[in-house]
Amino acid sequence: MRYISVFVAFVLMAAIVGELPAQETADVLNKRIGTAAGTELLIPVGARDLAMGGASIATTMGTDAIYWNPAGLGRIEAAAEGLFSTMSYIGGIQVNYGAVAVDFGGFGAVGVSIKSLDFGSIPLTTNDDPEGRFGRTFSPAFIVFGVSYARAFTDAITAGGTLKLISEKIERVTGSAVAIDIGVQYHNVAGFKGLHLGVALKNIGPQMSFDGTGLLRRATSSEGRRPEQFYKSVPASFELPSLVEIGLAWSQNIGEEMNYMISSSFVNNNLGLDSYRVGGEFGYTMGKAKFFARGGVDMSPTGADDEQIFGPTFGLGLFYSTVGVDITIDYAYRAVQYFDANSMFTLKLSF
């Protein structure tokens, strides 16, 4: 019976993914790639879900879920949680993320999160100093601040959302935008124990606009006898990288000490390549401790001129329960072409 259940779960996964529309063109599968603003919204956080290839939107929960699927925040298993995650990204960029969440019982769970990118000090070059010999530097500041709310409507269904404020600053030019994420999780679909469904709409909002004194240019009017003065260049606004994601997961226990989960998802990216994600997790319980091994892959169909630089993911996790606080430490590794591999560490405390 167990093998029949697993087979049915995979048939359902394949059916849902197969019905979703694919992107079309000749050499490039989405000709709008590179036209999005706020692409830091797509940088993952949380080592557990990254290690599973990002395929776990149907089962992610607690503070981990705020980025992946805010509905999972409604499944928080503690009165309060705090999470910190850091990742060495590409080109020497460090991505830091923190989140806290509180469960208010029947009202639901509320969370606050912040993601920041550390670019380090970059040499400042100008028309007067093209070689950067004056030794001046600058450091861009990219920050995403979010407020999340989620609630369990039944034992099986939870829904949630996140309001995000996006801020980018490079020298004297700033970009700003507002976006929302909305998600739903349905566990034990139609009473089928172990089969879970997740849907998320992310980065939905108006275009990002730019402003600042760095857009001013000194010029002389071509009409009349006006003296030299500053004129402001009017910047274009750009869409956010909105996407729709749907996923299925199958989880089962093997006796009292072991459990496994297999997840899959399809991501329809408005301004990027669509992707198919598959991941899994194996857990082993030993007293107050739980050990996890994870793996996954994010696959994107590509045209002749497309490229996917991110490869398979792997990870380990440790959960330990103590008096008054539960400690979770997760690690994820993601292979990257042309750059050093991504390494992410996450620490979560549950009270």
Image: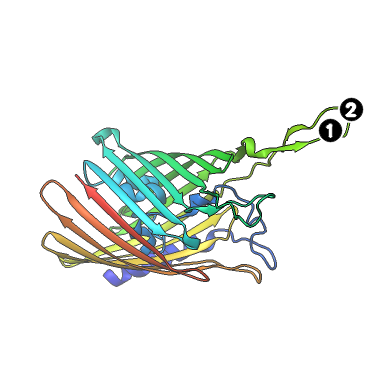
**Residue drawn 19% across and 62% down?**
290
Q: Amino acid at mark 2?
A: Gly
**Relative depth, front residue between 182 and 173:** 173
136 in relation to 285, above or below: above
To which quarter of the image does residue 193 belong? bottom left
Tell me where residue 312 appears, x and y as whole percent.
Answer: 43, 70
Asked if marks 1 and 2 touch (Cβ < 8 Å), the reply is: yes
Query: What residue sits right under mark 2 in the picture?
Result: 224
Query: What residue sits right under mark 1 in the picture?
Result: 221
Q: Is residue 23 left or right of residue 117?
A: right
Q: Which mark is residue 21?
A: none
Q: Residue furthest top?
A: 225
Q: Is residue 280 left or right of residue 283?
A: right
Tell me where residue 132 appears, x and y as whole percent.
Answer: 60, 55
Disc 2: CA contacts within 10 A as few (<14), some (14-19) or many (>=20):
few
**Relative depth, front residue between 325 and 86:** 86
Is residue 345 in view? yes
